[in-house]
Amino acid sequence: MNLVDALRLNRDDVSPEVISFVGAGGKSSAMFRLAGELAAQGQRVIITTTTRIAADQIRLSPAFVSTENDHLPLDDLAAALDRHGQCLVIGRDVIERGPGVKKAGIRPQLVDELAARAPALGVDAILIEADGSRMLPAKAPDSHEPALPASTTLLIPVMGMNALGAPLDEDHVQRAALIRRLLQLPPQGATRLTPAQMVRLLIHPDGGVKNHPPGARCLTLLNQVDDPPRLAAARLMAHLLAGDGFSALIGRVGMAEMEPIRERWGPVAAIVLAAGESARLGRPKQLLLVDGEPLVTRTASTALASGAQQVIVVTGAWREAVTKALAPLVADASGRLRLVYNEQWRTGQASSMQAGLAACATGTEAALFMPVDQPRLEAALLRRLIGAWRAGAGLATPAVDGQLRGAPGLFDRSFWPELMRVRGDTGGRPLLRRYQDQVRTISTHMKILADIDTLADFQGLTRPAQT
């Protein structure tokens, strides 16, 4: 995946995306690579920093302009954007601190002024490096950091996987003593960073998400994932982050010859549609016993085993009986299973789909819709659908003999506004047909997807297929 697709940037003609990179282990590489991708797509991009910038980094931009006495050279900036599509904005002051000479950045308030002037400049995005890290893979922010503009719409805390197993000392991380304090580790002694500790540092309110601007999205970047052991560790970290409600990208943004993002992770909701009246069957199919358990319980258990962070069962016609059947599973699910009643269930499947989406936890990145009447459905298939989304698919569904089936179906949140406009007794199939060229299909057997509509279907049911 490229960065533009992985970040799912807002293409608003009125206001730009204002993206602040913080942390360590690849901020500059990610910022300049994203600027290049946007410019290649015809977008106009401003790059800047609220800290300091080295001469070799300035050369990464095809053009730069300098402010003087907090005055923005708007005419020069517009001309540079006309020529190159991207331009770096920096301060004029020279700073000699540590090795090398650096230029000053600009104040966060000037970034806010740039954001306000973006429509007049035709600017689509403003990218900011909001703190420094001495080129180390992990850090804790000092008291004055990060210098975040109030206009930030997307905060990206970055951590390099080179920090994995690194000693907590100043040769390997920035502000080791502060990291120890944030992680409640002993102030002295041999300590090496573990995946769980790296996650805690990334999402600590005084760590990676410090000064998170209200209303801004947050998306962590696990960078420097360039070998299988680091990929395995990054996946573990991404799983832990998703469990805490945070989304993550697993990337290698400094490797120009390869795609910058290997995988995306985030909270996924599995939504079981169990609101129907079962008129054709003549009895509530949700309560049919399959291998000794109600069908709705069986389906919810499969959803819980899929790896989804949240499972939502939408009830309707048989609300009380379904709620009673699921009560033991709800008690054992540690808060992962939620029941939602669709008052409009008589209007058809679309209203149940929308009730499920409305119940998703804040920050949910994708929804996996499951019918309640597929007793042979396996968690392994659901995990493959979620895996397709992590690899970049916006839509994913099973296919049998090359034919798209549509249930179960996974929908990235970018498609949710269209799902909320569907009406009647239909679900996501119209979208799957409309965007068929974008659907990632997972091959499976028809017996795995067999459903129950009539009494004959139920009577013909045998033991769940094994694969």
Image (tube, rainbow, N blue to C red):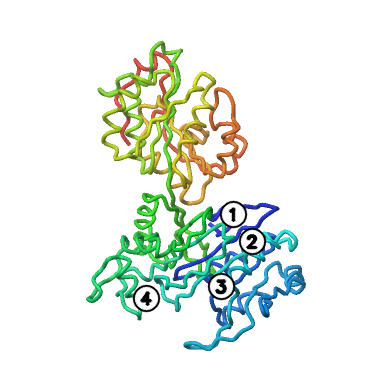
Dot placed on the residue nearer the N-terminal end, 4 or 3: 3
Left or right of 181? Residue 15 is right
Question: In the rendered view, would you say 263 is above or below 436?
Answer: below
Density class for disc 4 (Cα within 10 Å; few <14, some 14-19, many ≥20) is some
Marker disc for residue 175: 4
Of the residues under marks 2 and 1, which one precedes in the sequence? 1
Instruction: State which tag comes first along the sequence, 2 or 4.
Output: 2
Give the labeled residue for mark 1: 9
From the image, state whether disc 1 or disc 3 is nearer to you: 3
Q: The C terminus appears in which quarter of the rendering? A: top left
Q: Earlier in the sequence, mark 1 or mark 3?
A: 1
Q: Which amino acid does the dot numbered 2 rest on?
A: Ala
Where is residue 350 shown, x and y percent of the image? 54, 27
Tell me how far mark 2 sits from mark 4, CA to CA.
Answer: 31 Å
Which residue matches tag 2? Answer: 125
- Residue at image location 53% in from the left, 72% down from the top: 28
* Amino acid type for the residue under numbered disc 1: Leu
Tell me the kind of residue under disc 3. Answer: Thr
Q: How many marks?
A: 4
Q: Secondary structure at mark 4?
A: loop
The residue at which mark 3 appears reads as 50
Element at label 2 = strand
Q: Which disc, if any, is residue 309?
A: none
Q: Relative to the observer, which residue lies in front, 427 or 52?
A: 52
Task: Tell me how far mark 1 sits from mark 3, CA to CA.
Answer: 22 Å
Q: Earlier in the sequence, mark 2 or mark 3?
A: 3
